[in-house]
Image (cartoon, helix red, strand yellow):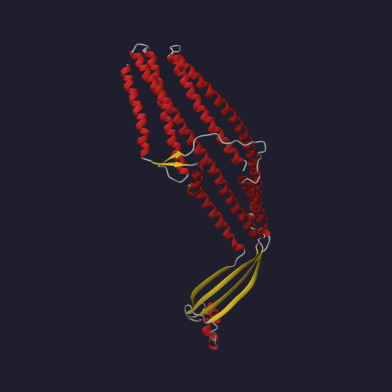
Amino acid sequence: MPTINTKWTAFLLLMSIVLPFYFAEAQERSLVSLEEARTRARSNNTDLKLFEKKYAVAKANYEQTRAVLLPQIRLTNTSTFTNNPLMAFGFKLLQRDVSAPDFDPGVLNDPGDVENFNTRIEVQQPIINVDGWQERKAANLQLEISNLQQERYLEYLDLEVTKTYMQLQLAYKSVAVLEKARETAAENDNTARNNLEQGLIQSADYLNVQVRLGEVENQLLAARGQAENVSEYLSVLIGNGANSYLTPESDLLPFDQESSSGVQLNNERKDIKANAIAAEAQKRMYSSSKLNFVPRANAMASYGWNDSELFGFGADNYVVGIQLSWDLFGGYKNIGKIHKEKALLEQAELEQQKYLDQSEMELNKAIRLRSESQSRMALAGLAVEQSREALRVTTNRFEQGLEKTMDLLHAESQFLEKELTYYESVFNLNYAQAYLEFLSK
């Protein structure tokens, strides 16, 4: 039994050392700092580019509303062929080609085939379009909302990159701690095997040492897999694709903590401001729907040429006028639209207040979380020192034959657990600080 377990242990040790390097070689290795990761994410992140496209769409929608201010110009060419007596005489008038013989009753009744080619430039200029002006203002507010959402996503992207970078630091720190623990477990395995051969310990003690070595190996494999997963996610965030193997340039250390006594919710925070502007935009749309009953005024002008030849310019004419129109009743369509926009306005105002309350709650929660994280890190640091000292004492007593193998394994396991917990508490505190800064911007 000991011989089989020794071979299995040697195989595990070999595979745990070789496999990570084998797969890592297939990927591009590069050191990256937190600031560099943020900069590259701002330049290459796919989601950020999608926000830029959404802003471009909002800008295009706003540009379309210029139609309520600018003229509409159209050029047309119409070719007409007829033997209709009335139209035929009218075409001759338009062509200014009427002569005395054209008044002959026979000719008037049977004019034959008549051709008319009309080329015309038409201009329509809005003068009064009050509901359109309100819609234009609403579209401008939507453009501002889109810009604020893009800027807020930049802040969120910084937070996500920071969080992922710290997770990568934690993963590498966990790998380093577990590699050290594996070395210790491997040394214990060699010592226990020698003691077993000398008859100083029982087979059960040696099996416990091997079980402990296997546990550490499993933890180390999981930690290395987590490091690769986090590295891949960070690589995607910064636009490197999924085949780049990133290594953090700095170690996992606690951030400098700032006092949270003066931290308050900023109503000018970009996402909160965007919600307020969304309610204002809906108010404009509600006003626009009510102004559908206000008369509209448009100036119109056209200049045209009529000729019996294609693209001819034989006879010119013009038309100038002003059109004033009211939509007095549109089958309840306008009234229904008013009711709809009013409901949407009330919905937007409720959503704005709800978002404010949720943001306030989230900020208070983040303040409490940071305070708890500070306390937990302090307790975790104390536990590491205590477990380190306990391991030292247990190791000395074990070497003197005063402690059992299980006591030593328990002390080693406890120290490893407390060390990993401490670094996890450092990560939690750093993220709590970064998240609080994100919420209080």
Is 262 on the left-hand or right-hand side of 21?
right
Q: Who is closer to the viewer here, 279 or 99? A: 279
Quick one: quadrant of the N terminus?
Answer: top left
Is 17 on the left-hand or right-hand side of 366?
left
Up-down relation of residue 111 to residue 345 (above or below): below
Observer able to see residue 294: yes
Residue 127 x %, y %: 65, 66
Residue 436 x %, y %: 60, 38
Quick one: quadrant of the C terminus?
Answer: top right
Observer able to see residue 219: no
Q: Who is closer to the viewer here, 180 or 153? A: 180
Q: Who is closer to the viewer here, 123 or 14? A: 14
Which residue is the extreme one toward the bottom?
Answer: 100
In the figure, residue 190 lies in which quadrant?
top left
What residue is at 60 percent from the left and 55 percent from the top? 139
What residue is at 55 percent from the left and 34 percent from the top? 254
Up-down relation of residue 439 to residue 332 (above or below): above
Residue 22 x %, y %: 35, 36
In the figure, residue 30 lies in which quadrant?
top left
What residue is at 51 percent from the left and 84 percent from the top? 107
Residue 20 x %, y %: 37, 34
* Count of picture labels: 0
